[in-house]
Amino acid sequence: MTLHWLTAAVIAAAVLVGTARLLLWRRASRVDTPLWRLGALAGLQMTAAVLLYLTLNPPATVVGAAALRVVTPGQVAEAGPGEIPVALPESDAVDVVRVPDLATALRRFPEAQSIRVSGDGLPPRDQGALPVPLEYEPGPAPVGLVEFSSPSPVAPGAGFEAGGRVGTLASGVVELVDPADQVVARAPVEAGDQFQLTAYTRAAGLALFHLRLRDAQGDLVEEIAVPVETRDAAAIRMVVLAGAPNPEVRQVRRWAESVELDVSLQVDLGAGLRLGDAAPLTAAGLSEVDLLVIDDRRWETLPGASRAAVASAVRSGMGLLLRPTGPLGGETRRQWAALGVSLSGAGDAVAPPDESEALTRLDLTHDGSAAVSILLDDQEAVTASWSGLGLGRVGVITVVDTYALALTGRPEQHSRIWGAVVSALARADDQARPEIEGLAWSGRRVAVCDLQDEGRVIDPTRAAHSLIIDPGAGARRCAAWWPETAGWHVAVDDRDQPTPFYVHPADAASSLLRAADRQATLNMAAATPDADAHGQRRVAGSPWPWFTALLAVLALLWWLERRRPRQD
């Protein structure tokens, strides 16, 4: 039974009780009451009952077509005939009815059959399903950044990428600036160009790089902070096994130590002699290793039990990097293929062109659709790749002289190569933690997802703010939060695995916000049907006319009840 039917049933029962009372009163009275009086009282009771129902449930009324003209920042059109102009809080328009949000405007003006938005679009607060069609007249496209991808957490020494797209700026340059205010990467751009800049980290921690967009004259157009989280890699244990002394593994060890990896190196000297740390080639020992690097010569000397232990460790999550140093034997190829790395090619060295700064690589190709590229050379040849095996990854690198980069004054390129390899292959971090969706701005909604419990956010002042998971978020288990201050924040739940994230100031990179609101409003307009300019629609009626009539009938009923005939 609906609420309307329940209300009607209760009112009808009250009318029946009132009518029965009138009949019993007339029968008990010693004075004959005129029938017209009894009928008038009963009729007024039924009339009052009907008016009470209509007051509680006023009937819908048909209204004519009207459009709600919503003015946002960057307005490009004035209200036309048949339009009701309203301004959202973000707009500085004058002489316009101001509303706190779009839902309030729709309630205040129920005759609006459609919504027409002009300017920069609707903010996230008003982005959602609408009961009426939406038309959008975009304002001028932003000049600055219209897309920006913040880098994911990286390991020490690994490279990170900051990319995006520029708006209508005719020509200019984007610069990536490190925390010391030194330009570490730049690229020329024109209107609509996408870009991607790369830089490198050294030690674990949080750092703020900056992305600056300048015009052709060098003037600053827009700037946004690039937050970089370098997660502590001290827990990553890396074991390097080499079949003979060579400068490549020595330089790899130096790099690993410089970025604070827990690295051990063992080199086979021949005649049963080995130099370096003991290699834990057992199931128990390899369970503590995150990445094993081994060349073909050392692989060929491993006992069968050790190779089986390595394969089992990879299936349990360990990373394995195979490093061929020359042509491979048939047995080694078959054993590596069993690990998921099927190689084609003779394995001969491919020297770079005379004037090229490229490295020497082997003529080997990682076959199979499951192979995932890690590194490409200048000729777009894959020089490092991996494929999955159980819970772990098996990779192969065909470059044999990366040490030359460090010896010729290009250590950052050497760091980029090995940082990318380690990041791709090392045992995955199985410590789940909260996730922040998209970029965060002060004063705008932020979604914190993958929460195990209600969670909390710790702001720069160390104050904790509790989060409440939205039941409608489903398996994503997201909570909404509105940051009040800019700076580094931390999201955490009962797993005690913090997720640092940066909140940009409210006025930072306004072009990004304008572009996001603009695109979201365009998507909303495309998802709604076209407005009918001559149509009508039914809206909830006002209860006040029915309530006024009810008061009048009740007053008449009270007066008639009070004028009962006197009993002798």
Image (tube, rainbow, N blue to C red):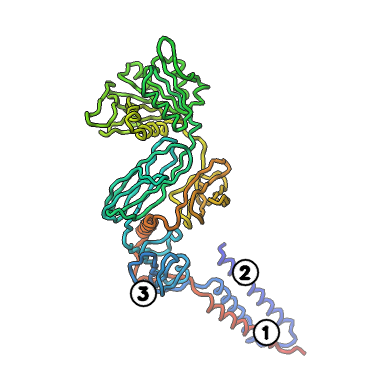
Side of 558 relative to 414 (left or right): right
Q: Which residue is mark 3?
A: 82
From where the camera sits, is residue 527 visible? no
- Residue 74, how many percent across, how many down? 36, 64
Res 98 quadrant in image:
bottom left
Instruction: Using the numbered discs, state the Cα–Cα distance from disc 3 to disc 2 in whole angstroms.
Output: 43 Å
Q: Which residue in the rendered view is the most extreme toward the left?
A: 354
The amino acid marked with disc number 1 is Glu
Q: Which mark is residue 10?
A: 2
Please identify the quadrant where the C terminus is shown: bottom right
Q: Which residue is mark 1?
A: 561
For disc 2, the neighbor class at 10 Å (few under 14, some 14 to 19, many from 20) is few
Res 114 quadrant in image:
bottom left
Secondary structure at numbered mark 3: loop
Instruction: Using the numbered discs, state the Cα–Cα distance from disc 1 to disc 3 in whole angstroms.
Output: 51 Å
The amino acid marked with disc number 3 is Gly
For disc 1, the neighbor class at 10 Å (few under 14, some 14 to 19, many from 20) is few
- Residue 496, how many percent across, how many down? 56, 41
The amino acid marked with disc number 2 is Val
